Image: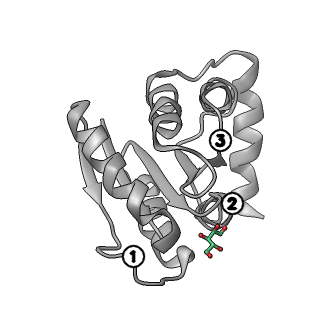
Amino acid sequence: MRISIASDHAGFEQKQQLVDYLVFRGHDVADRGPDSDDRVDYPDYAVLVAGDVAEGRADRGVLVCGTGIGMAMAADKVAGVRAANIVTPEFAALCREHNDANVIALSGRFVELSENEKILDAFLETAFGEGRHAGRVEKIMALDEC
Ligand code: RB5
């Protein structure tokens, strides 16, 4: 799978490790930065990953900041993106099955790396449930026009 990933300073260390993990798992990974843990503003990096997903350069996006909250808020502003801030593998599976999330926002400060790896596995391996969920996701996407 083609995956675009980025972080801010608070998520930098885990982002570096998650890039290695995703490559090890056989994914085609585009690291959109940053290249150091110097202080940066998370929306500047969220938009890079969100743009990759919205414009078809990546199948999924992964963002890491302190909590994942700001990254999710920023990425979800980009039309075509369904971003979810996720801190458990169970919610990672549900954001795929029910919401067809295409960007995940992780916490680098409050969730251990090993747990974020499990979260990513669930996010990347769970299919959208279709059926009753499809119309609801269509209604979410119609809000891009508001
Ligand atoms: C940076 O201090 C922090 O605000 C950021 O990483 C993130 O948690 C925002 O939602």
Q: Dot 3 lies on which element?
A: loop
Residue at 59% across / 60% down in the picture?
79
- For the residues labelled 1 and 2, the Cα–Cα distance comes to 19 Å
**Image-quadrant location for residue 69:** bottom right
Identity of the amino acid at label 3? Val
How crowded is the residue under tag 3: few (<14 C-alpha within 10 Å), some, or many (20+)? many
Disc tally is 3
Q: Nearer the viewer, mark 3 or mark 2?
A: 3
Q: Is mark 1 within 8 Å of ligand 1?
A: no
Q: Position of residue 110 (x, y in %)?
A: 63, 52
Residue at 78% across / 64% down in the picture?
146
Identity of the amino acid at label 1? Asp
- For the residues labelled 3 and 2, the Cα–Cα distance comes to 10 Å
Nearest to N terminus: mark 3 or mark 2 = 2
The residue that mark 3 highlights is 87
Residue at 65% across / 47% down in the picture?
84
- For the residues labelled 1 and 3, the Cα–Cα distance comes to 22 Å
How crowded is the residue under tag 2: few (<14 C-alpha within 10 Å), some, or many (20+)? some
Residue 57 showing in the rendered view: no
Residue 40 showing in the rendered view: yes
Q: Is mark 2 within 8 Å of ligand 1?
A: yes
Viewer-side residue, 57 vs 15: 15
Viewer-side residue, 102 vs 138: 102
Return the mark for residue 69. 2
Nearest to N terminus: mark 1 or mark 2 = 1
